[in-house]
Image (spheres, coloured by chain):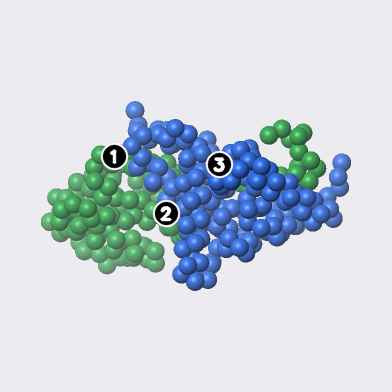
Amino acid sequence: MSHNAWLSDLYLAHRRLLLLVAWNVTGNRDTAEDIVHAAVVRLAQLPASPAEPKSFALKVVRNLAVDHMRTLQSRRETPLDGDLNQPAIARWDSEDGELVEAIAAALDSLDFESREAVRLHLHGELTFREIGELVGKPLQTVASRYRRAIDSLRKMMEAHYEPE
Amino acid sequence: MNQNDLSPIEQFLKREHLPMPRESFDRSILLTIEAMDTLRGQKPWLAVHRRRTALTMTAMALTGIVSFMAGTYFDYVTTSHSTRALTEVEAPPLDPEVQESLSKLLFCQSSGETIWGTIEQVRQMKMSSRSDPSF
């Protein structure tokens, strides 16, 4: 049996989430793919499957992404693909034009931690506990960030949607 | 997460579509896993890295002069590949089969075409490299 079968299974089951975690940090799809690829190489070198493969892999991806952004900043390079403190404008390709632009702009106006909580909870479908483990913060902190972010977004997006 | 549990603004935000990873990217990941699996237990002479414009291969010299020479060559090809097609690279004479295997392992995103070799080709390329006096 393939030694890394667990990794193939993990990737196929959570590939969108892995990419989302990297993209949320880097703000650039190509860079996010690089990060996920680098993470997979590291995971493939493990002697055995970790106890909690999904959370372990997400942490590896996020740590690599954060390291990448810090390296860019420490070199004082012009960030081509985002900045932790200045939310990236980059976003996925979409056919939803104006609406997505409005949502993305609203999300980009949030601070990094709040945006991460929203994306990982709504789009990554992670629980607050899972997000907390990933970012190294208590569940309550993550939940609080999320609620504040949603309140802010509600105000920003009122012009674009009609509450039911 | 139950859609009905979401507030209107949460449902609205969820409409921001985040598409699945590209098929070519999926293939690059799965090939990498397979390659790493195949090379497990051996010196990791080959690492596959994906970069912005191309999937590149970087050979790492770890043990022995043969591996070192192969690494130098692969680094050379990797560097050249980003700007020119493999066939245009002014590389040292190569065994045609090695060159063919190498070309198939390179992923050329800029052309919009994805070309992959098999793990068996990687093995053959490795063995050819070892026996090729030009290395």
Closest to the camera, between mark 3 and mark 2, is 3
Residue at the farthest left position:
B133
Other-residue count near label 3 (Cα within 10 Å), few / some / many at <14 / 14–19 / ≥20: some
The numbered mark 1 sits on a residue in which chain?
A: B
Tell me which corner region of the image, top left, top right, bottom left or bottom right, holds residue B4. top right
In the structure shown, which secondary structural element does the residue marked by tag 2 occupy?
strand
Q: In this view, does A92 lie to the left or right of B88?
A: right
Residue drawn at point x = 29 percent, y = 39 percent: B40
Q: Name the residue under label 3.
A: A133
Question: Up-down: is B131 above or below A8?
Answer: below
The residue type indicated by label 1 comes to: Arg
The numbered mark 2 sits on a residue in which chain?
A: B
Q: Name the residue under label 1.
A: B40
Tell me which corner region of the image, top left, top right, bottom left or bottom right, holds residue A131. top right
Q: In which quarter of the image is the N terminus of chain A?
A: top left
First reached walking from the N terminus: tag 1 or tag 2: 1
Q: Quadrant of the C terminus of chain A?
A: top right
Other-residue count near label 1 (Cα within 10 Å), few / some / many at <14 / 14–19 / ≥20: some
The residue type indicated by label 2 comes to: Arg
Look at the image and tell me whether residue B120 can be seen.
no
**Colour of chain B in the rendered structure image:** green
Other-residue count near label 2 (Cα within 10 Å), few / some / many at <14 / 14–19 / ≥20: many
> Where does residue B17 sit, x and y in percent of width and height?
67, 47
Residue A19 numbered mark, or none:
none
Residue drawn at point x = 42 percent, y = 35 percent: A50
For the image, the number of numbered tags is 3
